[in-house]
Amino acid sequence: MHRYRPHADALSAAWRDLSGTLEALLPAPASDKDRTLANANVFLEALGHVVLAWTWLRQALVVNDALPRANGAADEDFYPGNLHACQWFFRCELPRVPPMLALLRTLDDTTFGMAPQWF
């Protein structure tokens, strides 16, 4: 697991940030439901990224264990490809989560400022 410790740490941090954001948002719906839901798509994207990071890390751990027993060229190409995809996700996609969650915690209501006739 030591090879993937930085991934596990990044995933843990993202999960804590997501949980903290949820705790910050939970009291708000009673007082201002529309404002809380104004950026629901951002929440869903952030949650999806955290879940996918967990999935990639879990898969990387399985693949890393299986790599020494690779059976033929197909496995020898497929396994490193999976490990590289995991690396890419943790470097390029998971870092997008904290700014999304920061926006959510502000209860930003910019979406409500747009008038339909401006389209």
Image: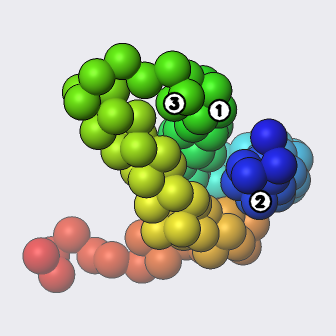
Q: Specify which label sits upstream in the sequence, 3 or 2.
A: 2
* Nearer to us in this view, 30 or 88: 88
Marks 3 and 2, how far apart at CA: 20 Å
Quadrant hosting residue 101: bottom right
- Whether residue 91 is visible, yes or no, is yes
Q: Quadrant of the C terminus?
A: bottom left
| Amino acid type of the residue that numbered disc 3 sits on in the rendered structure | Leu
* Total numbered badges shown on the rendered structure: 3
Place of residue 86 in the rendered image (x, y in percent of width and height, measured from the top left): 50, 49
- Whether residue 39 is visible, yes or no, is no
| Amino acid type of the residue that numbered disc 1 sits on in the rendered structure | Leu
Residue at image mark 2: 6
| Amino acid type of the residue that numbered disc 2 sits on in the rendered structure | Pro
User: At 36% from the left edge and 18% from the top edge, which residue is drawn?
Assistant: 71
* Nearer to us in this view, 81 or 99: 81
* Nearer to us in this view, 2 or 11: 2
Marks 1 and 3, how far apart at CA: 10 Å
Place of residue 93 in the rendered image (x, y in percent of width and height, measured from the top left): 48, 62
Place of residue 35 in the rendered image (x, y in percent of width and height, measured from the top left): 61, 59
- Using residue 39 as the reference point, say whether residue 76 is left or right of it: left
User: At 51% from the left edge and 30% from the top edge, which residue is drawn?
Assistant: 67
Q: Specify which label sits upstream in the sequence, 1 or 3.
A: 1
SS at badge 2: helix
Residue at image mark 1: 61
SS at badge 1: helix
Q: Specify which label sits upstream in the sequence, 1 or 2.
A: 2
Residue at image mark 3: 67
Quadrant hosting residue 99: bottom right
- Using residue 16 as the reference point, say whether residue 103 is left or right of it: left
